[in-house]
Image (tube, helix red, strand yellow):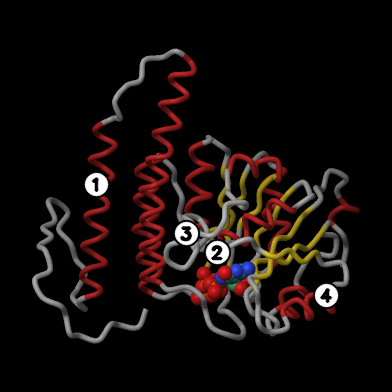
Amino acid sequence: MVSQASLNPSWPRISVVVPALNEARNLPHVFSRLPADVHEVILVDGHSVDDTIAVARQLRPDVRVVQQTRRGKGNALACGFEAATGDVIAMVDADGSADPVEIPKFVDALLSGADFAKGTRFAPGGGSSDITRLRRLGNRALGMVVNLCHGTHYSDLCYGFNVFWQKYVPVLDLDVTSPPSPKGDGRLWGDGFEIETLIHMRVAEEGLRVAEVPSFEHPRIHGVSNLDAFNDGLRVLTTILVERRRARRCHRSRRRASGAPTAAVAARDLVHMETALVRMLYVLRSIEHGRPWRYRARSPIIRPRTRRSHRRAPRL
Ligand SMILES: Nc1nc2c(ncn2[C@@H]2O[C@H](COP(=O)(O)OP(=O)(O)OP(=O)(O)O)[C@@H](O)[C@H]2O)c(=O)[nH]1
Ligand SMILES: [Mg+2]
């Protein structure tokens, strides 16, 4: 395989961060697809109970194994970013769904001036043979909300294949040191599958230049997904609201620091966001009840649930 670095002297050192939870059977495929000249491969283990670490070390004796500090994919990625020493970081799932052969395409986007190369399955040249109808719908609805709030044009909010300059890790402001939450399953906000949304919102908030790169998502090869479309979708929704508040706080403190008067939040922004949320909740509620999910373009009416539905939940 011809190394990109030998063809292009400005080719950056690439740290590949691979979050892995019981992925021993998928690692041989994923590692075999890595470009020849990556600077380092960081496997962030989620306390796997299979041979994930042993297989990784056998396949690549130079692999760096990092143990995550809490639970969840988001925390794993944060720990991997913290450990990375390359010029750029590539986020690559360990289940075979992201193809590391695509990494140079993302790096080209960075070398052409982007700060953050964001994978998208929904641009010409991209695609997915994995995503379900519900996930596609939820992803689109959540993406619309983020685009409305931030003036972004993201075509794929919840896709995990992204590559960015390592110098922007501080911009993401991810917490790797706090202890697990005493409540629930120990995950803090950002520790779960909402991580991609959180990253994209913070990147937009900081005004980084984002280039969308078409990418193809394959089905996981072995094992089962750790994602729960409904619960993780709700976590994403909550993250959008929490991040929105965080962005407003940052704006206010920046204005205060620059001496400008602190204006009230633009009412139009709020109205937009609330309308989008109401529409999305209506769609999700209709899906949960197995009804057609058409909604009215204006004034969607949402009545409180009066009795529990006894229908079987659809397969998500
Ligand atoms: N270290 C670590 N990795 C995780 C954790 N949860 C998921 N992962 C990894 O994150 C990647 C994506 O997780 P998946 O379970 O495939 O979820 P997904 O790709 O969003 O969903 P599917 O499209 O259904 O595969 C995989 O490489 C997982 O092994 C975790 O808690 N810790
Ligand atoms: Mg997957």
Of badges 4 and 1, nearer the viewer stands 4
The residue carrying pointer 2 sits among few (fewer than 14), some (14 to 19) or many (20 or more) residues within 10 Å by Cα, namely some
Q: Inspect this view and state whether residue 37 appears.
A: yes
Q: Are marks 4 and 1 in contact (CB under 8 Å)?
A: no
In the picture of the structure, the residue carrying the numbered disc 1 is: 274
Disc 1 from disc 2: Cα separation: 31 Å
Kindly identify the amino acid type of the residue bearing the numbered disc 4. Answer: Arg
Observer-nearest of 291 and 22: 22
Q: How many marks?
A: 4
Q: Position of residue 191 (x, y in %)?
A: 52, 59
Q: Tell which tag, 3 or 2, sits nearer the viewer.
A: 3
Dot 3 or dot 4: first in sequence order is: 4
For the point 24% across and 74% down, the residue is 288
Q: Quadrant of the N terminus?
A: bottom right
- Find disc 2 in the rendering and name its residue: 126
Considering only order in the chain, which callout, 4 or 2, is on the residue closer to the N terminus?
4
* Vertical placement of residue 129 versus 148, above or below: below
Judging from the image, what secondary structure is the residue with disc 2 in? loop
**Alpha carbon separation for disc pair 4 and 1:** 49 Å
Q: Which residue is mark 3?
A: 194
Mark pair 3, 4: CA separation: 29 Å
Q: Closer to the observer: label 3 or label 1?
A: 3
